[in-house]
Amino acid sequence: MSTSAPVQNHEPAEESKREEEEEKKGEMKAAQSEEREERAEEKTEKEEKKEEKKEEKKEEKKEEKKEKGKEEDARGSWKDFFYNPRTGEVLGRTASSWGLILLFYLVFYGFLAGMFSLTIWVMLQTLDENVPRHQDRVADPGLVIRPHATEITYNRTDPLNYQQYIQQLHDLLQQYNDSIQERNDLCLVGEYTDQDQDQGSIKKVCQFKRSILRQCSGLPDTSFGYAEGKPCIIVKMNRVIGLKPKGDPYINCTAKRDSPLQMQYFPSEGRLDKMFFPYYGKKSHPDYVQPLVAVKLLLTKDDYNIDQMVECKVEGSHLRNNDERDKYLGRVTFRVKVLQ
């Protein structure tokens, strides 16, 4: 009995040692496993970083490729816009598309041109080539003078100084030469020369000979009185188709000064004979000449070097000559200054 007791006391000690050893082994294994896990995590982190870098590089390459592709596409798109060899398009359209759109515009603008031509043709059918359809704005004629100047200033001792005025008068009276006017008809004095209104017929022209103007005709005195300081001014009335002035029209000129200025009229009394009316237009009356009135200013030495303002009006008829809005309607004003 005494011999078995010590053996039983050693067994629990050994078991405790074994348990301690096993615990140590377990701890060692746990530590090793933790180390392994840490190493594995480090490896995974490194691998993830490497993969991220690779992906970033791939993305950068992709972006570079995209940018290059965009540039190439832009270049190719401009080239393809002008001509696309794959589709055969020119400026974004095929040949058939261009043909259709050109055909459309050809028909469209052709229709517009036809409509415009038709309206012009219809309008022309309502017009008369010889007489204006509306002429209410020129019912009363204006007056003009030759020389064509509102201020006539010259030195009578210098022929070159007034040569331009003389030349204008000669040019005006060329068509009134007696040799030319003798081809025209002799008309009844004081009567209108009414003629048939047949379209296309040439109307006869009444004679108005240059010699009627006598001292202002440029025949006896080629200087028209400018050399002697008594200049001639020719007054004429503008042409108005169909005008038939009532009464007995004549030209009357007055100087705007205190004392009257002596003047001579050719034809006598400055009359505009009614036989020169009416006027039938440029086509029906191609050789027509309107009547003239020459006014010779009988200036004296006291009148030299002084501005002489002269106003001429058509009087003795229903024609207006006092419209303040139009100073040339039925009248004309000019200045004359003779130097010595």
Image (cartoon, grey):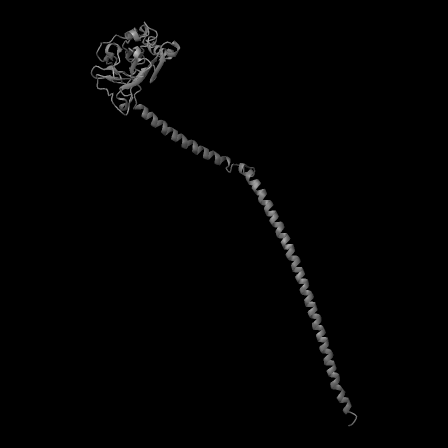
Residue at 58% in and 43% down: 71
Specify whether 9 is left or right of 134: right
Return the residue nearer the eye: 165 or 113. 165
> Residue 221: horizontal and vertical position, in percent?
33, 6
Residue 322, compared with residue 273, is above or below; it is: below
Q: Quadrant of residue 304?
A: top left
Return the residue nearer the eye: 112 or 25. 25
> Residue 42: horizontal and vertical position, in percent?
68, 63
The residue lying furthest to the right in this view is 3
Q: Is residue 63 visible from the viewing direction of this image?
A: yes
Q: Quadrant of the C terminus?
A: top left
Q: Quadrant of residue 171?
A: top left
> Residue 147: horizontal and vertical position, in percent?
34, 14
Residue 231, compared with residue 110, is above or below; it is: above
Residue 49, compared with residue 30, is above or below; it is: above
Q: Is residue 282 visible from the viewing direction of this image?
A: no
The number of callouts visible is 0
Residue at 68% in and 70% down: 34
Q: Quadrant of the N terminus?
A: bottom right
> Residue 108: horizontal and vertical position, in percent?
41, 33
Q: Quadrant of residue 334?
A: top left
